[in-house]
Image (cartoon, grey):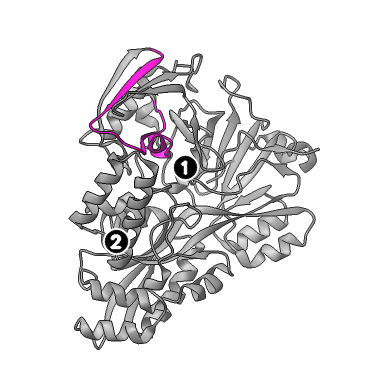
Amino acid sequence: MFRRTLTALALVASPALAQETDLTIAIQLEPPHLDPTSAAAGAIDSVLYSNVFEGLTRFAADGSVEPALAEDWEISEDGTTYTFTLREGVSFHDGSDFTAEDVKFTLDRARAEDSVNAQKALFEGISEVNVVDPQTVEIVLSQPDGNFLFNLAWGDAVIVAEESIENIKSNPVGTGPFTFSEWVQGDRVELARNSEYWGEAPSLEAATIKFISDPTAAFAAMMAQDIDAFAGYPAPENLPQFEADPRFQVIVGSTEGETILAMNNAEEPFNDPEVREAVAHAIDRQAIIDGAMFGQGTPIGTHFAPHNPDYVNLTDLSPYDPEIARQLLADAGYEEGFSTTLKLPPPSYARRGGEIIAAQLREVGIETEITNLEWAQWLEEVFRGKDFGLTIVSHTEPFDIGIYARPDYYFSYDNPEFQELMATLTATTDPAERSSLVADAQRMISEDYVNAYLFQLAYPTVADARLRGLWENQPTQANPLAGVSWSE
């Protein structure tokens, strides 16, 4: 999820010289491919968002939405027509001009019947995309959408060109401040400064994003200063050691990552709300935070970020109580318990948390068969194939409670009342009304015990003490490098 371009010169030059213009930053997960518009893997955005690809709008470091490839826009009085004025003089990395035709191609592709965009629902409200002229595009919605500009800032909505779409998964071509140089699978992605970038030129000439999945290897690489930074550092038990070392800085931020024990609502026994409630009461959130994350994380009781002003603390609906869990299982006809699968993706929160959760479930009579999956396997078996009983994953997309209105989503929650609620929210623009509806949505999924809500993922970054400009928080899963520099 981070990259660095390593030249032969950088390999032999002294660290002090190399680090003036180059950066090697590590992340834990490697993306399955490099097209953010056709996969659910957040690792793709961790590498490419605001580095190689850009959208009409984008998320700033504080989570606000700001102009990107669209420098301005007008909204019709009825809230259904958005007219975007595009920046002039923008080109893709292959030298082709960025125009309104590229916007139309991108959005039509994302909302097409055969679209494989992981967040296709973001675009379902679009009824037309019209090219007014090369620098102006008109987007017509079927109804007002109070989240539309926010939705366009997602990584799934970055602008791609039809001419480069065939090879996008291995050779991404965007408009961003860095160009793609090379992907050495299993090791790194290398980027180079885009000398033709429309915005402020990056300080870095090159950046390498290394993939280091093993926490022990992450510690060794950081201590040896083989890497300059590790974003989303996977071994929080090491943080005090880095904090005490003047060579490093430790930045602990927040994320949009709701970490959940997801349940397959379409399959027995998790199609029974009593069983799902029993699972929720069997989980000791704080024990997981302490044992797997060494205290890094905020307990949650619903699928919503605690730092959001509309967050409702609903942890009291599912306190840790094994006796209640056993009684609920007995009431549901599972007095002797049952067995199920627990399929875990690679991140530390899942692998470490999974062992703790398996022990907690065993205490109430639920036996789990743990299977550790690589990310591509998890996407295929769990996310797309829905072949699981339980899984642990952190949902890092911003304001993504709308996934519960999608019956075909991997945990298969099908509640027409919730779907109607979310449709009303989408059509509502008044801030106070939206806040009330968001609170209702949080309560509904919590009271239905759709999943067991664990904690909001913290985001620790360990970096060379001289680095400036790394994102502290993760308003979306990304590591923008255009503003990163070395201090004197």
Residue for point 52% across, 46% down? 1
Coordinates of residue 341 in the picture (x, y in percent): 31, 71
Q: Amino acid at mark 2?
A: Met
Residue for point 57% across, 19% down? 196
Please check the rendered image and state whether residue 140 is part of the magenta-colored stretch, yes or no.
yes
Rendered position, 257 above or below 81 = below
**As rendered, which of 420 and 158 lies closer to the eye?**
420
Residue 4 is at least partly visible in this image: no
Q: Is residue 200 left or right of residue 356?
A: right
Label 1: how many residues lie within 10 Å, few (<14), some (14-19) or many (20+)? many
Coordinates of residue 301 in the picture (x, y in percent): 41, 66
Q: Is residue 223 left or right of residue 156?
A: right
Residue 444's label in the rendered image is 2
Which contiguous range is marked in magenta? Answer: 134-160
Coordinates of residue 76 in the picture (x, y in percent): 32, 23
Give me the C-alpha separation between circle 1 and circle 2: 30 Å
Residue for point 61% across, 33% down? 482
Task: Give the quarter of the image for residue 124.
Answer: top left
Rendered position, 364 above or below 342 = below
Please check the rendered image and state whether residue 306 is part of the magenta-colored stretch, yes or no.
no
SS at circle 1: helix
**As rendered, which of 45 and 319 lies closer to the eye?**
319
Residue 45's label in the rendered image is 1
Residue 145's label in the rendered image is none
Label 2: how many residues lie within 10 Å, few (<14), some (14-19) or many (20+)? some
Q: Is residue 353 left or right of residue 460?
A: left
Q: Amino acid at mark 1?
A: Asp
Residue for point 39% across, 43% down? 431
